Image (cartoon, rainbow, N blue to C red):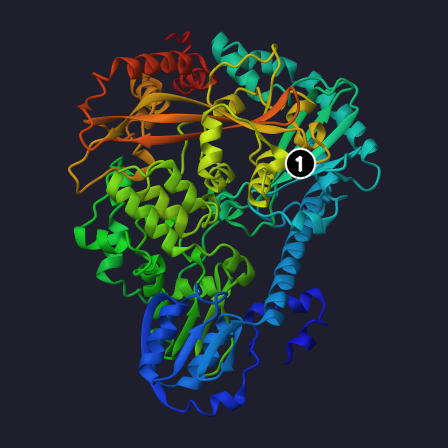
Amino acid sequence: MHPAELLSRNIDDMLLLPILVIIPQVATTSFQEISQNVTYSVKATRATKILADLSKISSMSLEASPQMRDEVLVIAASNIPLSDLMAKIATVTSGEWKHEGQIYRLVASSTLRRLEERNEMALRIKNVQRAIDERLKRSQPKPKADVKEKQPVLNLPESPEEAIITRLISTVDVSLLATLTPGARIVFSSTPTRTQHPFAGNSTEAINEFIQKHNANLAGNTDAMDQAFSKMTAEQVEAIKSFTKKQNSRIGQVSKALLVATCSGLGIFNLTQLELRMYDEKGSVVYSAQSVLSSGDDEISKMVAAAQGKKPEAPKAKQTPIEYSDDSKALIQTTAGMSTGNFKLKISPELHKKVFNPSQFDPLSFSTSDEILSYAKFKGKPLVADVPDTSTTSMYMLMGKTDTTVESFEKDLDQSKSMVLVSDAKFSLLKPAFPAQARANRLDRDALTTLLRSAEVNDIPSLGDIAEYALHAPDPMQGGIGQTYLMLYVPGALQQSLDGLTNWNMLRFYGSLTPDARSGLFGGNKIPLSNLNATQRACVEQMTYGSNNQLSVDDPQRKSDGQPFWMRMISGSQGQDYRDEPTEIVPNGLPGDGFVEMKSSTESFASPANDGTTPQIASLGILGSDELAIFKMFREDKNYAQISGMLPKFDKLRIGNRTVMSFTFRLTPQISVKQNLKDHHLPKNAPIVSDKNLPDDLQKQVDEKLAMFKKSPLGALGALMGGQKQAIHP
């Protein structure tokens, strides 16, 4: 079928595209010259290298265009006409061949790729609408005659909070929700600003009905809450109240309501999160509630179904094991001890050389390639596969998974989890289930290799090296191989202490600054937001309006308690009024008179010492006062005994120093976006100490943080977990 005909199909028909035979248009006169047969098999390798190999085998000149050079292919072909193999490569990569003189060049098919983009958007729209329809179905009262019918996954009794969110989400533009990608954020409003979107229908009526039910329920629950609180300490009561303050307070007059939809980007958990906020006439948040938009067939829903006792599908009678290579087995075993609290990597020098050179040994050339090739052998047909980076996950390796079978791999193909099977009589053809998304999130192997070499040489790479990598790599929190490699092998790349995960847009912003601009910021200069280039401006916009935004309000009544961001969220100190909402406080985009400035300081940190062969995983390679204090609290508080047993042990620590860069992106005189970056330096001759004899400055910080954590809601919850009715003191 010609691509032009496919463009006229409706959405439902378009959703079938991933499994259709999509044959690119090929210069047939060129292929008449390519009649020789070839035998070629290769694990995951970039197209540039594969076409160079095929050129040597066939004495032809095959090349990849810049758009196609980084496609990662797995091939298993024996005595196959080169023309057939070339056609199948074009099929799985959504490309076509151009004959230019003596060269055959693989180029992108713009027609097919536009079609794939439309197809993926149509699928997202359909999934969002299905999720909304399922929420609406659950919100309807069920007839008594149907009580015994099998309930769908997550069909729990709908609370008033869920009911109002369902009513509001059912009025929004579904196509807008479908544009949500990891890191994005959309705000719907009863009275929208320029950066918000309206509800349809009578949202005011729905909100007023909810307020009446909410206030009535509070009155009926007072006695039960008082009885529960009577069994707790004052600190426990305060902790519980701080968690539920916005949900368990009476709602007065509401002047505005927002429904915030975000996709935070957490690998396989890329659900749409929903938050309802209600503001009074002064702009204070008087109510908030959270929910998710789940279609019932995502990973979260399946986990809930398992927890509710739903029986898994019975395995097929025959289970064909995957033929894993020795390297793949060894790589999976590097993290085998994590389930017992051993966070050291067991990696041989030979495997280390391969893992730390992804330019030559592609990250997908290990277990992922073994599964694909085992499937091809099982099917008994030649194979060509274009493999997305999301075909492997961090969880896969961290769990030491080796029980995948050919049948389970085939089932994943049927369910279009990461790859799909393209119908073909003679070949097994695999391509990304979401090819446009896969292309956008393809990791630059050369950039990763450069970063890993820096980690090898310096133990901890510099901030500049990490920022340069961020300019060429997708956000690791979206999952994929980048997340795996950074978590295991690159200290400082994923986390900025307990203050949260590294903001990838902040790293990109820093990486895009010229040396003179960086020096100027260290010297106290300010950079006007109006002077930012396109890359820098996009980063600041994402930090301001994206899913992980954290606006800072300069208000004497909002005194900082020094707690990490995640702990402030637990204690309920976020989202106090309209000033915390970017689409309210800067509704017209970044202000022209805004600017960015930076202040720096230095402090000590610790890094686990190792024997050179079994290092700690990289995510535990940097221990500041926050980490050392919270580990100490967990070990000393008997109420956290179960948790403390799983914590890593640090017998010897190396002491380094780091520069802490505190960036302020000033949006208004009172409002800013604040981000921290840390540049670590660990000398080769760094002093080695134990956690009992830390340097004085670091020990002082640890003691201060420990006292703060014990007084925090987290410390109060420790007593609650242990059932201890006693005050918690530092």
> What quarter of the picture does the N terminus occupy?
bottom right
Return the residue found at the far left. 611
Q: Is residue 576 above or below residue 123?
A: above
Residue 573 pos. (x, y %): 57, 19
Looking at the rendered structure, the number of numbered marks drawn on it comes to 1
Q: Residues within 10 Å of mark 1 (few under 14, many from 20)?
A: many
Q: Position of residue 559 (x, y in %)?
A: 55, 12
x 71%, y 45%: residue:
136
When asked about the image quadrant of residue 542, the answer is top right
Question: Could you say whether the residue bearing mark 1 is in a helix, strand or loop?
Answer: strand
x and y percentages locating residue 593 in the rendered image: 67, 29
Q: Amino acid at mark 1?
A: Val
Looking at the image, residue 267 sits to the left or right of residue 633; the answer is right
The answer to whether 374 appears left or right of 524 in the picture is left
Horizontal arrangement in the rendering, residue 726 relative to residue 94 (left or right): left
**Measuring 34% from the left and 46% from the top, which residue is drawn there?**
451
Give the image location of residue 463, x and y in percent: 38, 36
Q: Nearer the viewer, residue 443 or 162?
A: 443
- The front one of 228 and 24 is 24
The answer to whether one can see residue 541 in this image is: yes
Question: In terms of image quadrants, where is residue 205?
Answer: top right
Residue at image mark 1: 260
Give above or below for 561 relative to 120: above
Which residue is at 31% across, 34% downward?
A: 620
